[in-house]
Amino acid sequence: MLNTKQWTMLLLASFVALAGCKKEDDDPVIDPGKGGKGGAVEKGGKGGAGGAGGAAAAADMAQQDKDRMMWAKLNGLIRDCINRFGSRVLDSRNYYLRRLDPKVGPSGKYCSSRYLYTPYTISDPSSCANAVRKAIASPPKIASLEKAAAGYIAALQILHPILKKASRYYGQGDYKDDKCAQGMDMHTKLLAGWSQFAEHNAKLRAEISRITDELSKRDLQRIVRRFGKGLRYYKKKVMIEAKSTLQIIRLDAKKEMDGQKPNVDLVTAQVKRFQQIAEAMEQTSERMADAARRAFWWSSFKRETFTFLKSCKEYMRRIRSGKGFRRWDRRRLGTSSGWMVSGSFDAALRNYNSLVRASNNVKFRFGR
């Protein structure tokens, strides 16, 4: 059975690329999360400072500066909130409920080490609180994002002391002394806290995903104007399409979990589209062999692109055949070993994460 962990990990992969990257030495275009000062006007701009072309160039630079501030606003939320706490909190819930019926709680026969698993603790959320305060105070102002961030940290701060208390209670075996009396009281608070956090976690992730999609599209346009459709273009294009492909597989896998029929045609069309982009990237890499050799980590990026593509094809082939998962494989889905199940969302997610890390490492110091 698939669980919450699978659905909460998706955007984490997408966001890893945004924090802590350095600006490339010869690249004035602002790439996501790379910071740096305002870029130069891209090659191919028309007109002088007094003409329509100059006005268009000035408007583009103003938008680029605004986008750079937006990335800076998002980076703290991604690094110190989403990446640090999102999966950890929901993994804690999954672990606690591994053998415990949430409707019953640790009562009766369930007040036993056979059913009780100590929920994971989380670190002090002060780093996230600071990131939220900075994001709310910094431009550009986006009310929906700031509201989602405020809800996220409020839910996290409520849950933190409850998790800390529950972890010590079960970890120390104190439930054996009071026959889970405190455990039952905490059970209700834990479920409520996790539920509230999951709601705000989903809202903040959705806001960040929406904004980063818009930023990435504009960034891709700038890359085309300055560098053409070379290596930089295909690095960005591959990542945009990889995210779209994983989103479709995620939603399709959720439908399967809910007992609905997978959308084979939609998945097949998207996998085919991603394959076309991957092959175009490979052809461009061969055509620009010298630049590809000079690009740090480029060969690894290519390899991870096709590894991710393969896992998407395996998912596509499995649903096309109408085959479900074996009982043992179903038990592994959503756990740390879920990626080992061929044709699963877990496998595609793991390979997507690897692709994101490879993309982060690519550096173009020369050429395109």
Image (cartoon, rainbow, N blue to C red):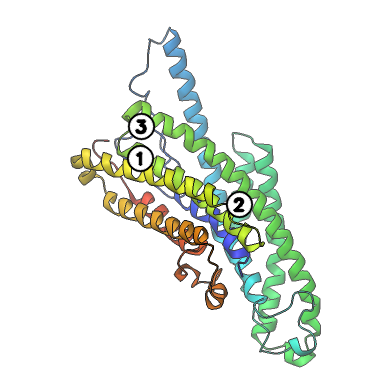
Q: Residue at x 43, y 43 (%)?
A: 273
Say which quadrant the C terminus sits in: top left
Q: Nearer the viewer, residue 72 or 232?
A: 232
Image: 259 above or below 355: below
Percent x, y of residue 238: 40, 44
Q: Earlier in the sequence, mark 2 or mark 1?
A: 2
Query: Which residue is disc 3 drawn over?
Result: 28
For residue 5, side relative to residue 356 (left or right):
right
Q: Residue at x 63, y 71 (%)?
A: 94
- Dividing the picture into quarters, in which one does residue 29 lie? top left
Say which quadrant the N terminus sits in: bottom right
Residue extending farthest to the left is 290
Q: Are marks 2 and 1 in contact (CB under 8 Å)?
A: no
Image: 66 above or below 3: above
Crowdedness of circle 3 by 10 Å Cα count: few (<14), some, many (20+)?
Answer: some
- Name the disc covering residue 130, or none: 2
Q: For marks 2 and 3, give the CA distance.
A: 30 Å
- What amino acid is at disc 1? Tyr
- Name the disc covering residue 234, or none: 1
Q: Earlier in the sequence, mark 1 or mark 3?
A: 3
The label nearer to you, 1 versus 3, is 1
Badge 2 marks a residue whose secondary structure is helix
Crowdedness of circle 2 by 10 Å Cα count: few (<14), some, many (20+)?
Answer: some
- Dividing the picture into quarters, in which one does residue 312 lie? bottom left
